[in-house]
Image (cartoon, rainbow, N blue to C red):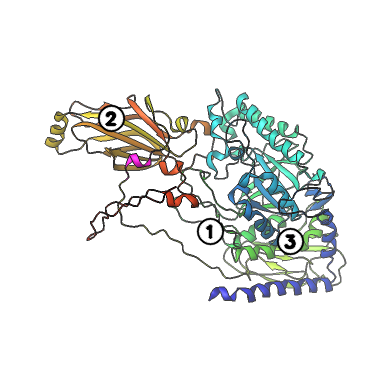
Amino acid sequence: MAASRGPPLLGFRALALALLLAILLLLGCSAPAAYAGAEGVLRQVVGRRGDDGGGGNFFEPFNVTYDHRAVLIGGKRRMLVSAGLHYPRATSEMWPSLIAKCKEGGADVIETYVFWNGHEPAKGQYYFEERFDLVKFAKLVAAEGLFLFLRIGPYACAEWNFGGFPVWLRDIPGIEFRTDNEPFKAEMQTFVTKIVTLMKEEKLYSWQGGPIILQQIENEYGNIQGNYGQAGKRYMQWAAQMAIGLDTGIPWVMCRQTDAPEEIIDTCNAFYCDGFKPNSYNKPTIWTEDWDGWYADWGGALPHRSAEDSAFAVARFYQRGGSLQNYYMYFGGTNFARTAGGPLQITSYDYDAPIDEYGILRQPKWGHLKDLHTAIKLCEPALIAVDGSPQYIKLGSMQEAHVYSTGEVHTNGSMAGNAQICSAFLANIDEHKYASVWIFGKSYSLPPWSVSILPDCENVAFNTARNLGLPVVQVDISLVSSHLHLEVRISQVLGGLPKRLLGILEHLNVTKDISDYLWYTTRVNISDADIAFWSSKGVLPSLTIDKIRDVARVFVNGKLAGSQVGHWVSLKQPIQLVEGLNELTLLSEIVGLQNYGAFLEKDGAGFRGQVTLTGLSDGDVDLTNSLWTYQVGLKGEFSMIYAPEKQGCAGWSRMQDSIPNHNKQMNAFDGLPC
């Protein structure tokens, strides 16, 4: 029943904003006319093409520069709203609809990372198809008349597997990631150059009539730079100069890099960035990641950030001098296949974003932020007109106003008949109490933790705490676990060709990241003396592993004995052995490679340290250097039974039901012929 109330509320919002705009025009507010001039470049679209966006220019070529106040599009300052949308986290069929919804929500810019491991899965072998068709994505953005902010990195973090680095990179002799290391710098430069060259060839930069107006080199390196000492400082400087040397003709940014060189704009990533200032007066204030939600881990709660708090943070950013803000994320999407980062991050990247994982508008967040963007655009002429600081008025102990205008404003009197362009932001940063403030000859009631936006310095167009959006529709999707016990037989799930080698090998060195699963199998001979010893003591032997990550499962003679989950935690598992030869199998499972932090190349996966069988009659047995058989992946994984067209081919076996009164063997289903 709640959903049926949606259309009337949506119509009320549109009607209210239309009436407000009419009132502002009647009162002589010149915001819409001035804004039309600032939007001039967007109106110079040469022509829209088909869904693939092929052929010709999208815009009349324009330059992108910046000053201390804002990014300049075609020589004009702009207040820009950016929507984070990562192209591989949606199917390519979804892109047109998603981009259109970003535009409808008030975005001027689409932001995306570029994912190295998706585009270069093997050294020197590039992939730009399907979900990784970056060129198609960029052209679709341009076809909607939007700009593109390309965060090349090529380190992304992004809760993406290995932070976006291809796993083959760690196999290069002598390599160390993200420091003054020649092998790493050579590979990084090759990839960044590849992306820039591709963008130039496709005429996607602004000066070529394309949508790209900003680029990023590196990502949050300032967070870890200290771990590398002076080599980190040298690397950061090298990365900046390497990027500048590619002659892209548009600005480069580095987020969270307080010592960024003068030629690079340093930017903010956080939940609130209204107090952020770049490291030089000559640079504009840019918020590259406005965390309007958060990612989720397996077993953890789903994070939520209210629409009101998100709107408050954005309004405060523009109130205090910000010029470009990017929602991270506006659409989060899905970590398809094996792209989820780690450890233990879920395949959904919904992020509590204004557009949910399935491309559906999340109300009231999407609608509330759309109204905010409309109000900010009404203020844009005043915001870009102020070259220095706005007028600041203290309205109370926790209340303040910032006034942007083309001339000095006497805030004690009425603004009626004032011909100058003027916009104001009234903030109440008290989290609990309403406040009544007096300014412009009027009294304004400010809810707790809110900003009121006055595009004409008189009428409130929007308040961040007053949400007229659609009601929240909550869908409870839960996983219902059955009580069936599934006995997995190793012979049914192994895929690929086994290899027999001495010693415990590191997981990634064996799998080369083609699977998250690696089987280790060896044999252990048990004497009658061992059996008698355990029987007399009333104990079982145990298998111990010094450290495992992320999941280890222990099988003895084809049956699951136990499991351990954690990030480099120890395992100790009692096991039941029989006299004679016993087959001991360890299954190592990765749930996303580490995606954040220093020294990623050293993290690895699988097992570390000693693998020991304890509690034998003659003492412990070290199995670490035994002969082990290695097998990569699962049978179902390599036969792709997850694909819709292959699901009928799976040889499923339903084992004995463990629910009381149902202890009968079920019939096996061998699947359909393929």
Q: Which mark is residue 589?
A: none
Graded by Cα atoms within 10 Å as few (under 14), some (14 to 19) or many (20 or more), the crowding at tag 2 reads some
Amino acid on which the number 3 mark rests in the picture: Ile
Residue tagged by mark 1? 304
Verify CB contact (< 8 Å) between mark 2 and mark 3: no
The quadrant holding residue 459 is bottom right
* Secondary structure found at label 2: strand
How far from the left and from the top, in percent, is residue 350? 55, 55
Distance from disc 1 to disc 2, alpha carbons, whole Å, reads 50 Å
* Secondary structure found at label 1: loop
Residue 81 is left or right of residue 546, and the answer is right
Residue 322 appears in view: no
Amino acid on which the number 1 mark rests in the picture: His
How far from the left and from the top, in percent, is residue 372? 69, 63
How far from the left and from the top, in percent, is residue 179? 60, 29
Residue 352 is left or right of residue 242, and the answer is left
Residue at 73% over, 64% down: 375
How far from the left and from the top, in percent, is residue 391? 78, 58
Residue at 69% over, 34% down: 194
- Residues 621 and 631: in front is 631
Amino acid on which the number 2 mark rests in the picture: Arg
Position of residue 496 relative to residue 486, above or below, is above
Distance from disc 1 to disc 3, alpha carbons, whole Å, reads 24 Å
Residue tagged by mark 3? 376
- Residues 315 and 155: in front is 155
Graded by Cα atoms within 10 Å as few (under 14), some (14 to 19) or many (20 or more), the crowding at tag 3 reads many
Residue 662 appears in view: yes
Residue tagged by mark 2? 523
Give the magenta part as a residue range.
488-494
